[in-house]
Image (cartoon, rainbow, N blue to C red):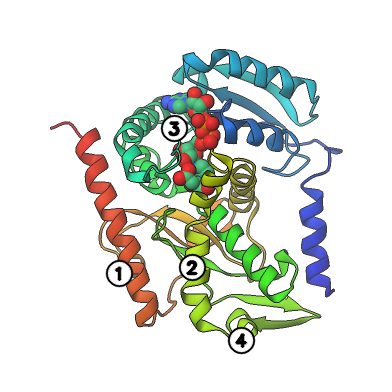
Amino acid sequence: MDSSATTRRLQHLSRHFKASNITTPPVRVTVTGAAGNIGYALVHMIGQGRLLGPNQQIILTLLELPMAKDQLEGTMMELRDCAFPILKEIRGTTQYDQGFMGCEIAILVGAKPRGPGMERKDLLAANARIFKEQGEALEKYASKNVKVLVVGNPANTNALITAQFAPSIPKSNFTALTRLDQNRAQSIIAQRVSANVEDVRNIIIWGNHSTTQFADVSQATVQQNGISQTVRGLVADDAWLQKAFVEQVAKRGGAIIEKRKASSAASAASAVCDHIHDWLIGTDNGTFVSMGVVTDGKLYGIKEQVCFSFPCICKDGNVKVVEGLKWDQFQQSMIDKTLKELLEEKEMAFSVVVTK
Ligand code: NAD
Ligand code: LMR
């Protein structure tokens, strides 16, 4: 294994180890839907230091609906019983003011999940209202530099709504989770070419966290025995990469729902930790990660404001979209399809939340 691979492996391992030198002030993190499937897994991963590393103390607030008060209390009891050293305080609430007061990282998981046979669009109206309320609450109570990650589906459109209703917080502080799709894609390629998953880099998820997303390997490489090779060259099967692979990644969430009779939970929570960790700690040199970001009218010629997943580089808490990548006809058609869906979702969602 080459030295950069060794470094990455050690960095990865260090995320899981317990705090030894706690020095910086605690960071205020809020998780909504904290007693649900993802929330339950996520708050324990946060306690283990997966979000900001093992030395960063956290004041963790768990926000839930009043009807989930008992589950919230039970989750907090278990979290306390873990005696995680980095959790300076654990708070639980069903009120937005207490949930978001001074919040610096908001992870918005709470939403109605999709059940077997349901389309994500079926949930759009109900969830649009939830994310409007949460945007308004962030506007009122959170830090003006709060970093927001939306997980609840349809995640991209919910992130756009949240940003819209928190106008004093920069749009660049709102993101949607597509890291789970990236992780899925990396894992499929690693298996296909018999590589370590962390040695597969720079697969891009473009667009929506939905079945129209486009998992693109045109920039992706695999590091093996100190040599970097392209995924396209190693796989040597463009037909598979453009169809079966893309579909497998895009439909993985639905396939898990069919088997588990519930939406993916631990893998989603793990991807949340990866997303926030890389956003705030920074991406590795030469590596980009996929994140849903709010477009500004200039990125890749997308004129409309949507929350679109792009390849991103993160440094000092800022997200920079990797620009200038060229698309061929196939890529362009895939991107047009996912953008079209996002525009339709936006229109439907805003017709629910924008009162004339
Ligand atoms: P779940 O039903 O197990 O948990 C949701 C929790 O949210 C519940 O405990 C509920 O009480 C709570 N909740 C609902 N509305 C709330 C509100 N307004 N404020 C606070 N809490 C609220 O669902 P889950 O399996 O944890 O999934 C949560 C969401 O994440 C779903 O929308 C699911 O589709 C989505 N998801 C996204 C990804 C992704 O990669 N972006 C992956 C998996 C799941
Ligand atoms: C996933 O990708 O696992 C989920 O977003 C699926 C879903 O619709 O809840």
x and y percent of residue 6 in the render?
Answer: 83, 66
Nearer the observer: mark 3 or 2; the answer is: 2
Q: CA distance from mark 4 to mark 1?
A: 29 Å
Specify the amino acid type for callout 1: Gly
Kindly identify the residue that appears in the image at 64 percent across and 36 percent down: 42
Q: Amino acid at mark 3?
A: Ala
Percent position of residue 78, x then y: 73, 21
Asked whether residue 45 appears in the rendered view, the answer is yes
The residue at which mark 1 appears reads as 301
- Label 2 amino acid? Val
Query: Label 4 sits on what residue type?
Result: Gly
Q: Is residue 170 left or right of residue 340?
A: right
CB contact under 8 Å: marks 3 and 2: no
Specify the quadrant of the image occupied by residue 119. top left
- When the figure is inspected, residue 250 is found, relative to residue 40, above or below; the finding is below
Residue assigned mark 4: 233
Q: Which mark is residue 111?
A: 3
Label pair 4/3, CB-CB below 8 angstroms: no
Q: Say which residue label 2 marks.
A: 246
Query: What's the distance in space between the residues labelled 4 and 3, CA to CA?
Result: 41 Å
Quadrant in the picture for residue 136: top left
Report the mark closest to the observer, 4 or 2.
2
Q: Earlier in the sequence, mark 4 or mark 3?
A: 3
Neighbours of disc 3 within 10 Å: few (<14), some (14-19), many (20+): many
The structure residue drawn at horizontal position 80% and vertical position 61%, both measured from the top left corner, is 9
